[in-house]
Image (cartoon, helix red, strand yellow):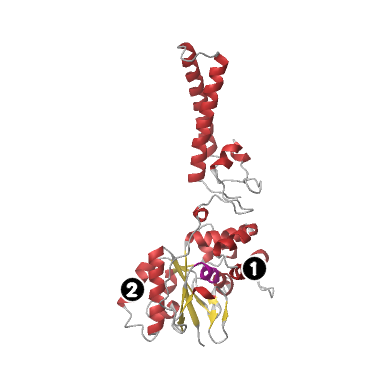
Amino acid sequence: MSYDVTFHCISKKEIQRYVFDILEHPGLLQSRATEVSSDSKVQEQFLELFNEFIIPWYMDESTPSGEPITAENFAAYFSFAIASVAGFLHPYWYARNSAICFLAEEIPSIHTLFQSFSSLEDSPLAKFDADTSMLMSGNYSASGVLQNVGAFKGWLLENQSNIAELIDEDGLDSLLRTLNYCIDNGLYLIEAAEIIEPISGECQSNYGNLRAHFLKNIDLPAAPRTTRSDEHSTNTCKKCGSNIGFIDVFKAGLPTMITCGKCGNYVKFNINPYIDYPIIICLLIAFAAITFVSGDYLITNQVLPFKEKYIFAGTGITFAVIFEILFGVWLLKFKKVIG
């Protein structure tokens, strides 16, 4: 059996934004597709990947034939699909019959290098109980993520003469290029089989990002994709994908009244009701006390030539605005949108 192996790169945040977020909130798919590429054909391919495959698998918890998603077939479905997603986000490299999982003879514990997508933090795929699905299981499958790429590259360079029969020269070159790209950009590595099939020309990802010796484009620049500023933010509306900004928080007044400025959807942050709310209430009481003391001081010392009610109203509004500004900064910096 032969393998058309490809090595892919993706970050933890990208897995969250371009896989997990979409699974939990399918309404984000269209806006995420426009982030992936400005090319309408690439966007259509990305949309099809989710609409025809990933989302139905997730919702139905089964394959198109009705077979349940299990630890045994997880690598052939979700892991393979996520490798395809990674190919839309970054360059990926081809290696004929050369894969990290083939090194089991040299590294008996090879599976410990990878982590399944079902066991990643906050993974909605945890419901499939596929934590053992770490390695590529055959053709049309993929691994989980290899996180410590630097240490693995060091081992690979030290042992390249011992693995020549398992990974050929072109395969090793492709793998090292992928590892270097991951190291330079702080990314994880995934390996997959049959994302690209050179004989038939079929490709399950963005063909334009493929780097291969047989294409004679292996030396093409591998610059990371341009990231939009709001992609760094976890404060995006789960309905339309718009960024939730300070104005949205300030206008709401209360955490439960925050709405998206674009679509009007109510936004929920991950505020802990047992820890955060008591602290917020205590701070409100403190600010109210400061307001009273400040107003009383201004009146007693006749600092301002206004009536008492106007002075108290002015100090109240001033401290309310200050509190709201501090609250908005805290919320947007230390919390994230969860609904």
Residue matched to label 1: 57
Work out whether mark 1 precedes mark 2 in sequence or the reverse, and give the earlier one. 1
Residue at x-position 55% and y-position 45% = 245
Taking 18 as reference, is 94 above or below it? Answer: below
Question: On the rendered structure, is 9 left or right of 129?
Answer: left
**Main secondary structure of the magenta stretch:** helix
Q: Residue furthest left?
A: 158
Classify residue 197 as left or right of residue 148.
right
**Residue 159 on the magenta span:** no
Asked if the residue at tag 2 contacts the one at tag 1, i.e. Cβ–Cβ closer than 8 Å, the answer is: no
Residue 109 visible? The answer is no
The image position of residue 194, as x and y in percent, is 54, 80
Mark 1 residue crowding within 10 angstroms, few (<14) / some (14–19) / many (20+): many
Q: Which residues are magenta?
A: 82-89
The amino acid on which the numbered mark 2 sits, given as a three-letter code, is: Trp
**Between 129 and 13, which is closer to the camera in this rendering?**
13
> x%, y% of residue 260?
62, 46
Q: Nearer the viewer, residue 194 or 316?
A: 316
Residue that label 2 marks: 155
Distance Cα–Cα, label 1 vs label 2 = 37 Å
Label 1: element kind: helix
